[in-house]
Amino acid sequence: MSMNSDIEKVLFTKEELADKISEMGKAISRDYKGESLLLVSVLKGSVVFMADLMRAIDIECQIDFMVVSSYGNDTVSKGNVKVIKDLDIDLKDYSLLLVEDILDSGMTLNRLKQILSLRQPKSIKVCTLLDKPARRKADINADYKGFDVPDEFIVGYGLDYAEKYRNLPYIGILKPEIYSTDM
Ligand code: IMP
Ligand code: MG
């Protein structure tokens, strides 16, 4: 079966994503001029966005990756965060930009922000491609945001359901019958 037939509705095409990310890259390049910018991506959902965003930034920057405990195959956040793979870089003097695919409850990112601020970077900000404000539980907002999305299960462009659909080049709403059958 084709992945496309599991999608109820396309929210953002490849072209719409590219235009938005180009704008975000320009804003970040302007705001971080003269600083030691470190982009931190939380694996795995944000890798596709990270790869495109870093090439839309035209000032010097570095990248690093973290792995934290996540949903598994569940669609509801547990809110507990465990660092499974830490950063390689000492954060002192860096301006950190946390790059996320989607800000949902915000529990994960909020905890991560707390953990990383203890290492005293120069600043920490959040850049998310998608924001689902209806589901927010933690007191956290994005400093850079691509698009707001409705309270539906979204896949594609890095976002998965049970590790699938990450390689879709667009973002869409997954048909509810796909995930309701395994719950
Ligand atoms: P939070 O802690 O609830 O904000 O969880 C955010 C993480 O949950 C994201 O980085 C995604 O990996 C995952 N997530 C949240 N909503 C969705 C969705 O609609 N589709 C796929 N993954 C999602
Ligand atoms: Mg993620």
Image (spheres, grey):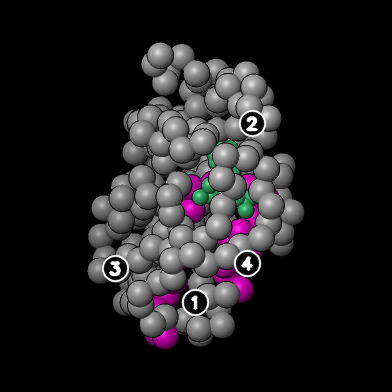
User: Which residue is identified by label 3?
Assistant: 61
Query: Earlier along the polypeptide chain: callout 1 or callout 3?
Result: 3
Along the polypeptide, which appears first: circle 4 or circle 2?
Answer: 4
Q: Can you tell which mark lies on residue 123? A: 1
Residue 167 among those drawn in magenta: no
| Camera-side residue of 105 and 32 | 105
Q: Is residue 172 visible?
A: yes
Nearer to me, 88 or 116: 88
State the residue position of label 2.
Answer: 152
What residue range appears in magenta? 92-114
Which of marks 4 and 1 precedes in the sequence?
A: 4
Residue 101, position in %: x, y? 48, 47
Q: Are marks 1 and 2 in contact (CB under 8 Å)?
A: no
Crowd around label 1: few <14 · some 14–19 · many ≥20 (10 Å): some
| Label 3 Cα crowd, 10 Å radius (few <14 / some 14-19 / many 20+) | some
Q: Look at label 2 and name its amino acid.
A: Glu
Distance in Å between CA atoms under marks 1 and 4: 16 Å
Give the residue at x 64% y 55%: 106
The residue positioned 42% from the left and 75% from the top of the image is 95
Q: Is label 2's Cβ within 8 Å of ligand 1?
A: yes
Nearest to the eye among marks 1 and 2: give it. 2
The residue that disc 4 covers is 111
Q: Quadrant of the N terminus?
A: top left
Label 1 to label 2: alpha-carbon separation: 32 Å
